[in-house]
Image (cartoon, rainbow, N blue to C red):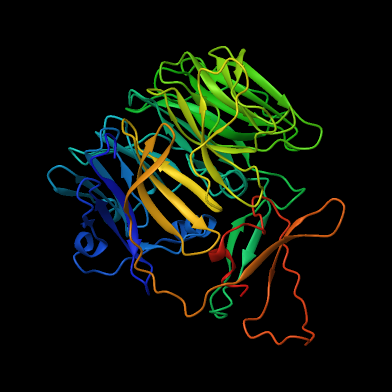
Amino acid sequence: MRGGDSILFLRSGPRDFSQDLYSFDPTTGNERVLLSATDLLGGAEEELSAEELARRERTRSSARGIASYRLSEDGKTLLVPLSGDLYVVRRTTGTVKRLQTSDDELGPPIDPQLSPDATKVACVRDGDLYVIDISSGSQLRLTETATDTVTNATAEFVAQEEMSRRHGYWWSADSSMIAYQENDESGVELLSIMDPMNPGTPPRSWRYPRAGTPNAKVRLGVIPANGGVTTWVQWDTTRYEYLATVKWPDNAPLTILVQNRHQTEEVVLSVDPQTGETTPLLVETDDAWIDLNQHFPHWLEDGSGFLWATAHRGGWQIEKRSRSGDLLAQLNSPDAGLLDMVHVDEDVDRAYVVFAADPTQRQLGTLSLNALSPEPIGALTSTPGLHSGVFGKDTDLMVQSISPERGPVRLEVARVQPDGIEAIGTLRSVAEQPSFVPRPEWTMTQTTPAFASVVIRPRQMEPGKRYPVILHVYAGPTSQMVMRSQSRYRLQQ
């Protein structure tokens, strides 16, 4: 929570997928159930629409109950989508208001989001964008162009599945406007999917862009939140057909990142929401491939500039750039092992990052936002394993995720110190402990170049006996197989 008075998290039981919302008090170490699906539904069974099931499949989520929630900027209001309805919960008073979206003839609300001032909720219903006034419950339809092949305000398949972008619309900081994407899938191939568990059920058809076939045609518009005419954003959609990233922070312009289909060229553009005109801030090219990171561009709070991640000097670097895109500084060297940025705290002029000198590990570190030349990453963690963190705003609290080389995964509540992390509590797990412990052996191949590898032997292996070998390699994007984390190898063991 902003200010650090509590930490909110979702947790299920050990043998079910139904999650409740919990609150952890970092001062006392006590936890309590803040909200449960049973309370909200009054004991009724949860129902999920086909659209919501498809979204959860794409995010690899099997959760039920409170699968997700939104928190207002001031931390006082919670928005919980559940069983086709939307519930607004005032955290300070505990009052619950149901927005009765399932009682009309429209489809269920998809991707509901609170307005920054927490007076309205936007969502997608039957392919169009709607805004609901929380106090009155009145509903306003902003777009009216949805058809069997045209949808509004939802991320198209490529963005959801391959670009880690789940949203298709974005509120302005003053809650007066919404930027949204329109998807035309009329040229996308229609495929049918049978249900192997129910062979008597007719197949369902979906638009799916197989490799080499047409993608959805995407454009971005800006519309007043109280209704009106859409202003369409202008860029070369023929050259850059992927709308990869959209940011609309306070004190900074609406900003988009667009890519060509080969993902060898991308442009960061600032957008004038009144006219739709765009101004290039920077261009990145690579003969082979440009990796995409949704944390960037990251605008500074006063809008004076932004942080940018680039690998065009060989390894990942964070750059500080001016409002117009000019390079001001490189915060780290390209050989520092930088992997990602997880938080920026301008009060202490630090960026918190994940890095790895050893590519089989992940450690937390810091970079100075005021660096005039590349600096080493300051390590916050060092124990072997995988470390990451979720940081609070206006507080020194964080939750560190630790998946150690030996031992179970744990979530530690901690305070960030200038020279490290001080654990002050634990978000406990209620998962059952398995009856065995994986025994991975990490090594390097005897080749040139050498490759990191892991060997997992039978627990009852007999000396001198020959065993068959299973070579288990994924070799696809974003999924590294060899990591110094014991818990990752339970299935293989």
Along the line of sight, the residue nearer the viewer: 134 or 348: 348
Q: Position of residue 42 (x, y in %)?
A: 18, 65
Q: How many marks?
A: 0
Residue at the location (57% across, 12% down)? 324
Left/right placement of residue 194 relative to residue 93 reads right
Q: Position of residue 414 (x, y in %)?
A: 35, 44
- In the picture, the quarter occupied by the N terminus is top left
Can I make out residue 84 in this image?
no
Q: Position of residue 298 (x, y in %)?
A: 51, 27
Indicate the quadrant where residue 239 lies. top right
Judge from the rendering whether residue 268 lies leftward or rightward of residue 69; answer left or right.
right
Residue ID at (50%, 57%): 403
> x, y (%) of residue 278?
58, 17
Examine the rendered structure and indicate whether residue 72 appears above or below residue 212.
above
Task: Using the rendered image of the protein, determine whether residue 39 is visible from the camera's viewpoint.
Answer: yes
Which quarter of the rendering shows the C terminus? bottom right
163 shown above or below 260: below
Quadrant position of residue 377: top right
* Outermost residue, right side: 448
